[in-house]
Amino acid sequence: MSDRYSQLVRLPVAGTVAKRIGLPQPVTLERGPGPVRGRVLLGGAGRFAEAAARVLADMGVDAATALDDPVREHAAAAGLDAAVFNPEAPADRTFKALVFDATGISSSAELVELQRFFHPTIRRVEPSGRVVVIGDGRRALEGFTRSLAKEVGRGATVNLMQVTPGASIDSTLRFLLSPRSAYVSGQVVRVGAGRAVALSGRTALVTGASRGIGAAIAEVLERDGATVVRLDLRDAELELDITAPDAPEVLAERFAGGLDILVHNAGVTKDRTLAKMPEERWQSLLEVNLLAPERITSALLPLLRDDGRIVCVSSLSAIAGNAGQTNYATSKAGLLDLVADLETERGITINAVAPGFIETQMTAAMPIGVREAGRRMNSLRQGGLPVDVAETVAWLASSGLERNVVRVCGQSLLGC
Ligand code: NAD
């Protein structure tokens, strides 16, 4: 789907005019697999500094450490080139990413460490750069990161990991630093003790996979080594209506030998204000978006192998609400109940993504005014792409995270 406004303001003259009159100036976001591409500055001196330094060293990135000694020691222990960052250094010393371990902050008075680290460095973040704060549950960090995400600009993102003691930060830090998280910003990810698993050799079922977001999810899972069964009404290897009364049975038979990853992506909209919403319109949507996923989850849960993964594709409407979408928002928020309540064991996890405005056939069909508002009313000033949701699903399908709802919305101004 083409975003003509974004193409136009990237031209030199139109870009200058847009800047002068204060119009949004979306930059082209860097996307694609692989680790962070560039120099990373690591700061803060909490209990994850060493682990963060190790992750950076493993990724082979060129990393520097901020002035304080404990971080420098951790970085040296991880084999990093512990160049000392000098806030007075010329402004051409820029960074692709800033990582700040805030778990060393033990009182409100020490929150000033955030100002001390980011004040001299935030303007040195490169376009499509990354800022990751590592915390241990302190709410003050959430206000800080969400606000910084709204300030940083130029396609850069800011996210917070709230990590419980003993948890591994590896998979989440890698994702949040990489170009794979291009449209994830202003998010708080809760990292628990679950264990990450590789996608290679795993079998995945993706519903609604013949086009749009579902097709992208299938492609990214395959790229990362999973064997994917695409399910859809038509044009798919497994042609099935998920609302069919025998769908759970058919799927249980198909995956009798086991399944590793279940992605509930199939979904429909049937917008109308509640006053004009007949029961049939309400119920037929609830069937596709919520009741069928619930039934299929019950049927497939016993067949999920150890460390199995369930990922639900919810929606920002579930969180923010949307006029004309009482049925849709109810169904998509109902998926969040499933994420919160499903009883799992054997290392099986369940999480959700909540996409905001994503460029698909679904959003191309919107009236132009609504479409433009959706595209611009977020910190990145543009719509996301199906691949942005797909990368986030792939990360949730491999990480050990549990019961997170990650918005893929460029920090939409709706439902903050
Ligand atoms: P889409 O309409 O392009 O694709 C949905 C797919 O689901 C289609 O291929 C369709 O055939 C399939 N499907 C519908 N009903 C089915 C059924 N009963 N059985 C089997 N398959 C069925 O939509 P999309 O934009 O790719 O959205 C994918 C998911 O993401 C949906 O759940 C949607 O609600 C959600 N979402 C999309 C956006 C967005 O901006 N596009 C935003 C938030 C959430």
Image (tube, rainbow, N blue to C red):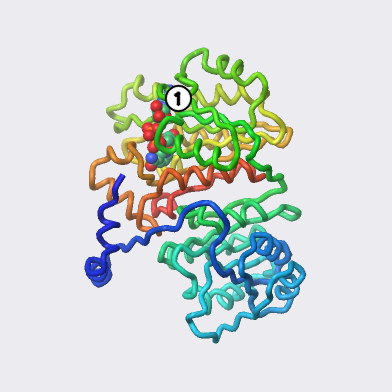
Q: Tell me the amino acid under the disc marked 1.
A: Ala
User: Could you tell whether 322 is left or right of 134 in the image?
Assistant: left
Q: Residue at x 59, y 76 (%)?
A: 112
Where residue 153 sits: x, y (%)?
A: 41, 66
Q: Quadrant of residue 279?
A: top left
* Residue 297: % across, % down: 58, 26
Foreground of the two, 128 or 57: 57
Q: Is residue 326 visible?
A: no
Write down the quadrant of residue 316 in the picture.
Answer: top left
Quarter of the displayed picture in which ligand 1 can be seen: top left
- Res. 234 visible in picture: yes
User: What residue is rendered at 44% in x and 40% in y?
Assistant: 315
| Residue drawn at the location 50% of the way across and 85% of the way down | 90
Q: Secondary structure at mark 1?
A: loop
- Left or right: where 112 falls relative to 353: right
Which residue is depicted at the point 67% across and 44% down?
400
Depth check: give the residue in front, 166 or 329: 166
Location of residue 101 in the rendering, given as x and y in whole percent from the top left corner: 65, 66
Name the residue nearer the viewer: 115 or 109.
115
* Quarter residue 99 falls in: bottom right
Tell me: is circle 1 under 8 Å from ligand 1. Answer: yes
According to the picture, the residue beneath numbered tag 1 turns out to be 236
Tell me the crowding category of disc 1: few under 14, some 14 to 19, or many 20 or more residues within 10 angstroms, Cα based: some
Quarter of the N terminus within the rendering = top left
